[in-house]
């Protein structure tokens, strides 16, 4: 059993259509700690010790957020800056996160074709996420391919529901360690072909 | 009913007040001394603008003392009076008894009969409620422990007037009586001729009826008046209440001042307390001023010049005796030296009761007329010098013997100059100071309450003691080198004085000022303070944020709303501060501002207008790109 910590960052959830549904899909799952950062620290007064204690208690860290200007919302960046301390998370003395895994769960307004070398964003999601990937790598954390929901601007309610469902199934499978995580490095995103991945994990579809 | 004479008198008194009080305040002498000097100036012995009728004015103006005690009562809850019972009885009782005793002995030494000596001793043991309280309040000392003790003593003296009035006729030798019998003051009372127990019963019944009426009838009465919506009718009702109480009390032989004080205490918990206060306050101020002027005008300089030596020596004797006894009592009652000095210097004079009681004593044939008028002049003069004595105490005695303005520095310690000066270290100032200290910023504190100064010094803070608006104190505290001055004083007037001093002498200092409400914020902004903090704004906003969260709003949304609210509100205060003297424009702009705020807040809610956090909004993106768009 993996213990999962979802770090959720959305500054204006009252305006959200997709993240709200994604959040609802996982927040009450057993074995999942859902941590709503903007709700906990509206004044950016992050409690570093508490955050570090939470990290220690979990095996998989999920960063769930909308993709704002190719990056995380401000509070999540602040969280990285303050919580991942030198001597604690990295550096010769900093080994508290070693052996853990991390996963980004990101929503983008634009569709997937926009995130190709030929698309108008010119880079892929995995390229955009390299700062986070490298941050975790430096902390000895294995960074999984991201769970990306593209094209939220034009998304129907049915599609949103289907993505939320995927998210829940993935989290459950990760929690129960049913997903074979080797050889995923080449995937553009972890939900590229989720059914196949989960079938390999023994899920009945 | 009044002809030109009335207007002429009013003109004289008002001119005297308007001219002399501001000058006295400017010179740092306080308003009481200003009024007294004004009285002397217009009195029969300088300009001669008022003559005999000054005595009538004095009697009329004594009503100001009554109003003052009513207002003091309003500020005191019954429980607080009860908690003061030890100082009232102990301190007040011993002051009156000891002073009367010593003065009586002195009288006997000078060959007075024991009756005369005792009567004079008792009368002169009393101090001046009006002058002491007004001066203490003006100096902001009423709430300190010395001020409270002085207040307790004065309260006891007010109560003591009743038995003194009863005592004086007993001292009269029947042959010397000029007016036959009579026990009350100049008015006839209902209790005359009643046996002692019945008298007591009547007084108790009167007080009880005030309590009952105050509790049960007053609320509906004032509600009825308030419903008429006429402001002046409410004022009339408030005055009626005080006058009726005063009359009732004098009819049962209690001093009107004490009676209305009681009424005030009873009404201290009433919901109309603040209205009563604000309605009566101006009358009190005017009448009290008039009272002080009359005291000044009543000083018989003719008599004084005839017996100059005698009057002056009596003055000195009276002040020294009272001062000595008060100092000893302060010691016995364990006051700190500073507070004891304030307490003793404030009470070392004869009181306004001396005028009433000496006239009464003369009528009763206890004291001989010429002696009585000499002593009245002495009482008036000691009252007049009280503000000067307190000034002497403040400027000369306290700095030498009291809590030192600054601590002695050890010679080998290099005194680093602190970049921040905090004026006033009450709850507000201490929060600022603690935060700065916790972050390694040195602060110098200016504080006016000597007890607090001692405590802070024990805690190792660098504290300067005294009136923060004084130039020399600011200079000593290092205002030349400091960068910031935090104005955390309770009193708005003191803050404004300080701003003026700083702007004149230390223009480089950046001022951060605390303000009670908008009005005070306007004053401070207008006086040139750049950073103004309304005490209630932040706690109000935080309460609002929590209320929104408890109702289920997102924490960050509530926080942003409060941030916007604050920006808008502070901008509005700045804008309105500039136009508050133009009433029409002010109201117009205020309306606009309120409207603007509404739009702003609704904008948050309805997600429209240009005030929302658009960065997090995807509506326009969705319209433009639909399914194909960007990040």
Image (cartoon, rainbow, N blue to C red):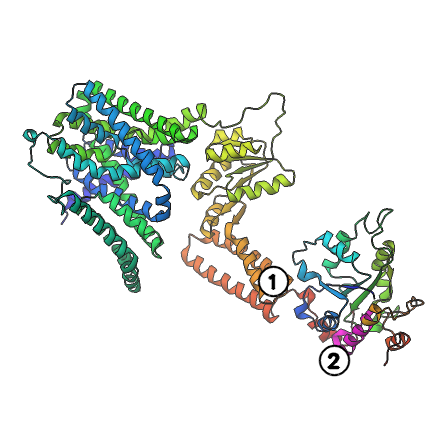
Marks 2 and 1 close (CB-CB < 8 Å):
no
Q: Position of residue A7 (x, y in %)?
A: 75, 62
Chain letter of the residue carrying label 1: B
Q: Is residue B407 visible?
A: yes
Q: Residue furthest right?
A: A183
Q: Quadrant of residue B354?
A: top left
Q: Quadrant of residue B358?
A: top left
Q: Nearer the viewer, residue B103 or A105?
A: B103
Q: Is residue B45 visible?
A: no
User: Disc 1 designates what residue?
Assistant: B558
Locate the C terminus of chain B by quadrant.
bottom right
Q: Position of residue A14 (x, y in %)?
A: 65, 69
Q: Nearer the viewer, residue B569 or B180?
A: B180
Q: Reply above or below: B28 against B556.
A: above
Distance of label 2 from label 1 (alpha carbons)? 30 Å
Q: Reply above or below: A185 against B299.
A: below
Q: Nearer the viewer, residue B609 or B223?
A: B223
The boundaries of the magenta stretch are: A147-171
- Image-based side of B133 in relation to B580, left or right: left
The prevailing secondary structure element of the residues shown in magenta is helix
Chain letter of the residue carrying label 2: A
Q: Quadrant of residue B372?
A: top left
Indicate whether residue A138 is drawn in magenta: no
Q: Position of residue B387 (x, y in %)?
A: 33, 31
Where disc 1 sits, the SS reads: helix
Q: Position of residue A79 (x, y in %)?
A: 74, 56
Q: Residue furthest front?
A: B197
User: Disc 2 designates what residue?
Assistant: A156
- Image-based side of B144 in relation to B239, left or right: right
């Amino acid at each position: 059993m993996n213990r999962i910590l979802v770090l959720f960052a959305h500054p204006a959830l009252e305006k959200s259509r997709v993240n709200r549904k994604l959040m609802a899909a996982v927040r009450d799952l057993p074995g999942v700690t859902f941590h709503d950062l903007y709700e906990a620290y509206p004044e950016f007064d992050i409690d570093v010790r508490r955050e570090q204690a939470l990290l220690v208690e979990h095996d998989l860290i999920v960063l769930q957020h909308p993709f704002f200007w190719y990056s995380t919302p401000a509070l999540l960046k602040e969280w990285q800056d303050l919580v991942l301390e030198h001597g604690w998370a990295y550096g010769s003395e900093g080994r508290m996160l070693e052996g853990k895994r991390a996963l980004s769960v990101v929503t983008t307004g634009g569709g997937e074709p926009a995130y190709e070398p030929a698309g108008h964003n010119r880079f892929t999601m995995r390229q955009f996420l390299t700062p986070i990937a490298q941050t975790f790598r430096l902390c000895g954390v294995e960074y999984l391919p991201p769970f990306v929901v593209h094209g939220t601007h034009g998304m129907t309610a049915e599609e949103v529901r289907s993505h939320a469902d995927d998210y829940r199934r993935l989290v459950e499978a990760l929690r129960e360690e049913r997903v074979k995580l080797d050889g995923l490095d080449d995937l553009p995103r972890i939900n590229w072909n989720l059914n196949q991945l989960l079938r390999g994990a023994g899920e009945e579809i | 009913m009044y002809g030109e004479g009335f207007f002429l008198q009013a003109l004289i008194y008002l001119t005297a007040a308007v001219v002399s009080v501001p000058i006295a305040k400017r010179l740092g002498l306080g308003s009481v001394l200003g009024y007294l000097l004004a009285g002397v100036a217009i009195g029969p012995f300088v300009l001669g603008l008022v003559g005999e009728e000054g005595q009538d004015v004095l009697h009329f103006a004594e009503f100001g003392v009554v109003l003052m005690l009513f207002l003091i009562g309003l500020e005191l809850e019954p429980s607080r009076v009860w908690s003061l019972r030890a100082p009232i009885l102990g301190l007040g009782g011993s002051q009156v008894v000891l002073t009367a005793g010593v003065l009586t002995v002195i009288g006997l030494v000078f060959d007075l009969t024991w009756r005369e000596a005792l009567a004079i001793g008792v009368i002169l043991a009393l101090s001046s409620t009006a002058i002491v309280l007004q001066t203490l309040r003006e100096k902001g000392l009423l709430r300190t422990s010395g001020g409270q003790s002085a207040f307790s003593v004065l309260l006891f003296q007010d109560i003591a007037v009743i038995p003194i009035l009863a005592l004086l006729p007993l001292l009269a030798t029947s042959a010397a009586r000029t007016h036959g019998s009579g026990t009350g003051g100049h008015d006839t009372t209902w209790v005359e001729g009643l046996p002692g127990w019945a008298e007591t019963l009547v007084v108790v019944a009167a007080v009880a009826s005030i309590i009952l009426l105050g509790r049960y009838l007053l609320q509906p009465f004032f509600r009825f008046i308030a419903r008429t919506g006429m402001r002046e009718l409410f004022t009339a009702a408030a005055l009626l209440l005080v006058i009726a109480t005063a009359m009732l009390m004098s009819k049962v032989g209690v001093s009107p001042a004490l009676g209305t004080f009681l009424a005030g205490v009873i009404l201290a918990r009433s919901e109309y307390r603040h209205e009563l206060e604000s309605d009566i306050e101006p009358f009190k101020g005017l009448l009290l001023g008039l009272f002080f002027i009359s005291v000044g005008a009543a000083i018989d300089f003719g008599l004084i010049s005839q017996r100059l030596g005698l009057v002056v020596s009596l003055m000195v004797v009276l002040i020294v005796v009272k001062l000595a006894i008060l100092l000893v009592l302060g010691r016995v009652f364990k006051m700190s030296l500073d507070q004891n000095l304030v307490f003793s210097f404030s009470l070392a004079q004869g009181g306004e009761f001396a005028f009433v009681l000496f006239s009464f004593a003369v009528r009763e044939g206890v004291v001989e007329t010429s002696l009585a008028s000499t002593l009245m002049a002495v009482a008036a003069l000691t009252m007049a010098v009280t503000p000067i004595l307190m000034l002497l105490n403040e400027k000369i005695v306290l700095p030498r013997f009291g809590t030192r303005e600054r601590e002695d520095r050890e010679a080998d310690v290099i005194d680093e100059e602190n970049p921040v000066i905090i004026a006033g270290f009450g709850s507000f100032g201490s929060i600022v100071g603690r935060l700065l200290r916790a972050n390694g910023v040195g602060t110098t504190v200016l504080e006016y309450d000597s007890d607090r100064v001692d405590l802070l010094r024990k805690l190792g803070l660098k504290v300067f003691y005294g009136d923060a608006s004084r130039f020399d104190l600011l200079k000593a505290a290092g205002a030349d080198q400091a960068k910031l001055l935090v104005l955390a004083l309770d009193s708005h007037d003191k803050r404004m004085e300080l701003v003026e001093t700083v702007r004149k002498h230390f223009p480089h200092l950046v001022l951060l000022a605390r303000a009670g409400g908008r009005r005070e914020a306007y004053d401070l902004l207008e006086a040139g303070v750049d950073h103004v903090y309304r005490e209630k704004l932040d706690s109000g906003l935080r309460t609002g944020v929590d209320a929104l969260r408890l109702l289920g709003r997102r924490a960050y949304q509530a926080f942003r709303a409060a941030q916007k609210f604050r920006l808008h509100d502070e901008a509005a205060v700045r804008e309105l501060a500039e136009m508050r003297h133009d009433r029409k424009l002010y109201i117009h702009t205020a309306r606009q501002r309120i409207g603007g705020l509404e739009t702003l807040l609704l904008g948050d809610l309805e997600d429209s207008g240009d005030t929302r956090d658009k960065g997090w909004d995807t509506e326009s993106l969705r319209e433009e790109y639909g399914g194909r768009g960007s990040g």
